[in-house]
Image (spheres, helix red, strand yellow):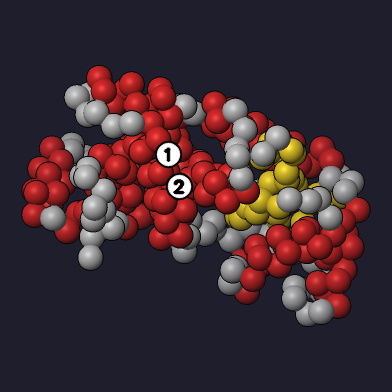
């Protein structure tokens, strides 16, 4: 069954709105106006529902593809997100090359949540991709969490934990780029909607970082559109196959 049944809009239009909202830091009303200029009448609340449904689904379907290349050094930190008028914590980890490894939205900042995030990030990695060094700031919860994980056999007992704040400057900068997407939201209402939206933001950030380049059939944004539509089965339509074939034929050949 089609992923877009009963949606009253073509799948290409829905995914375009989801990509644009999660990529460019637009408000829902801004995107409604942009689509109206393109001759498509769609309400901003409809776009909101699309993002809530297809943003997490996109992240889920691309999850095994965006796994970063082997990187023995991880940088782990948390940043603040306002949800329901209160500050919540977004745990994030990137490789030494800046690729996103994992993220986790938590209502509290504690040893239990740090342990939960680190366990989640390490568990989904292959043994060869597991870190040998984890850099964090001076937050003591990470050290306690790693110690408990080592005792429980949930990670390599030889992982080196370094608590040097300046080593995480790259991750702090990455937080800032993500915050530029979150700023137009002006705060989330619930944890569920916040996490669903952030999943869309994070996966589009991974496209910008080039983590999915190996799976993109074409260079640049054309490859991005192709991959997003492919994982939802849109490229299986005859019209879509003809479109992508003509696009491929139009691309300059390498000399």
Q: Quadrant of the N terminus?
A: bottom left
Tell me how many marks there are: 2
- Horizontal arrangement in the rendering, residue 164 relative to residue 123 (left or right): right
Q: Is residue 210 visible?
A: no
Instruction: Indicate the secondary structure of the residue bearing disc 2.
Output: helix
Q: Is residue 50 above or below residue 41?
A: below
Q: Residue at x 22, y 43 (%)?
A: 9
Q: Residues within 10 Å of mark 2 (few under 14, many from 20)?
A: many
Q: Quadrant of the C terminus?
A: top left
* Along the viewing direction, whichever of 157 and 255 lies nearer the viewer: 157
Q: Residue at x 64, y 71 (%)?
A: 123
Q: Is residue 38 visible?
A: yes
Q: Position of residue 55 (x, y in %)?
A: 44, 48
Q: Position of residue 231 (x, y in %)?
A: 32, 57
Q: Residues within 10 Å of mark 1 (few under 14, many from 20)?
A: some
Q: Label 2, on which residue?
A: 52
* Along the viewing direction, whichever of 247 and 123 lies nearer the viewer: 123
Q: Label 1, on which residue?
A: 48
Instruction: Indicate the secondary structure of the residue bearing disc 1.
Output: helix
Q: Position of residue 147 (x, y in %)?
A: 87, 68
Q: In the rendered structure, are the residues bearing label 1 and label 2 in contact, judged by CB atoms less than 8 Å apart?
A: yes
């Amino acid at each position: 069954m089609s992923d877009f049944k009963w949606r009253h809009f073509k799948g290409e239009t829905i995914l375009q709105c989801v990509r644009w909202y999660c990529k460019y830091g637009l408000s829902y009303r801004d995107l409604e106006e942009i689509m109206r200029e393109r001759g498509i009448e769609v309400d901003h609340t409809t776009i909101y529902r699309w993002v809530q449904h297809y943003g997490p689904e996109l992240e889920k379907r691309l999850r095994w593809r965006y796994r970063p290349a082997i990187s023995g050094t991880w940088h782990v930190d948390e940043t603040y997100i306002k949800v329901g008028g209160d500050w919540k914590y977004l745990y994030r980890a990137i490789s030494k090359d800046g690729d996103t490894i994992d993220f986790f939205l938590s209502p509290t900042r504690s040893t239990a949540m740090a342990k939960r995030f680190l366990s989640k990030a390490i568990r989904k990695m292959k043994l060869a991709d597991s870190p040998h060094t984890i850099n964090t700031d001076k937050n003591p919860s990470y050290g306690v969490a790693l110690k408990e994980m080592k005792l429980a056999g949930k990670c390599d007992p030889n992982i080196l934990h370094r608590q040097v704040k300046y080593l995480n400057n790259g991750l702090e900068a990455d937080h800032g780029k993500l915050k530029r997407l979150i700023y137009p939201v002006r705060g989330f209402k619930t944890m569920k909607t916040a996490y669903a939206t952030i999943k869309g933001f994070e996966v589009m950030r991974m496209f910008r970082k080039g983590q999915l380049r190996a799976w993109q059939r074409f260079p640049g944004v054309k490859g991005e559109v192709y991959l997003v539509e492919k994982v939802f089965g849109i490229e299986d339509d005859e019209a879509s196959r003809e479109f992508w074939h003509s696009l491929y034929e139009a691309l300059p050949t390498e000399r």
